[in-house]
Image (cartoon, rainbow, N blue to C red):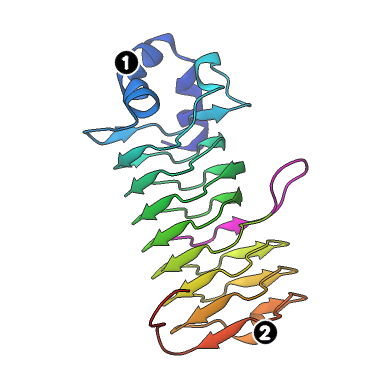
Amino acid sequence: MNQQQAMARWRSEQFLHEIQPALEAVFTAKRNHHPLDLRGIRVGAEAVLPYLRDKDFSHAQLTGIDLSYAQLTTSFDDGDFRRIRFAKAHFTGCTLSRARFSDCAFDAAILNIEGTETTFERCSFSDARFMPEPHAASRGGPHLVFRSCDFSRATFVEFELIAARFIDCNFTDAVFDRCNLQDTKFYVNVPDLPQFSNCNLRGTRFAFEAPETEG
């Protein structure tokens, strides 16, 4: 199923009737007990369905959901997300404060996100783009932790990651362009200096050993 097909089915009355129990599990119960296919969903201010315009993922505990091609303008604050697929999803001004993402795939996603004390473990950001957009958040926020994540061919443009921690991540062909990385620390596998272009690296640290603590 391509992106056009995934998004088109949300205009089908039959599909909406069939998917309603899954939506209730995600947005009302904030838990799911089975894998769910929500590819192409739109959640937040730009949602086509009125039902989804005021919905969010805050405080949710979700596992095994496919949100590929999703268009998201909403909150993930205080949520716990495991094995969620966000391939080619578009995050616009999403907040992720104190959220935890484990084994999630953000491959080729566009991420305009803001959060504090957010943790990503074993997540893939291959070919993802971290970038600002007009009238939306343009910074990752302080104290984000990325552990054992894949940033191969990822691009960070004018992105703010103050005091972030990257621990044993893959930065093959990743690019940081005009980013604010003040006091950010890279551990174990670290990017090369040519991968940074016009970035604020004041207080940035590169170390080839894992930290004893992340403070």
Q: Is residue 41 magenta?
A: no
| Secondary element at tag 1 | helix
The answer to whether residue 156 of the structure is visible from this angle is yes
| Secondary element at tag 2 | helix
User: How crowded is the residue under tag 2: few (<14 C-alpha within 10 Å), some, or many (20+)?
Assistant: few
Question: Camera-side residue: 93 or 68?
Answer: 93
Residue at the spot of label 1: 18
**Residue 208 sits in which quadrant?**
bottom left
Q: Are marks 2 and 1 in contact (CB under 8 Å)?
A: no
**Residue 48 sits in which quadrant?**
top right
User: How crowded is the residue under tag 1: few (<14 C-alpha within 10 Å), some, or many (20+)?
Assistant: few
Mark before the other along the chain sequence, 2 or 1 = 1
Q: In the visual, does 10 lie left or right of 159?
A: left
Residue at the spot of label 2: 194
Q: Which residues are magenta?
A: 124-138
Q: Quadrant of the N terminus?
A: top left
**Residue 57 sits in which quadrant?**
top left
Residue 136 at x, y = what percent?
71, 42
For image coordinates 50% across by 88% down, the residue present is 207
Q: In the visual, does 121 lie left or right of 158?
A: left
Amino acid type, callout 1: Glu
Amino acid type, callout 2: Pro
Question: Camera-side residue: 199 or 203?
Answer: 203
Find residue 209 and name its label. none
Residue 188 at x, y = what percent?
43, 84
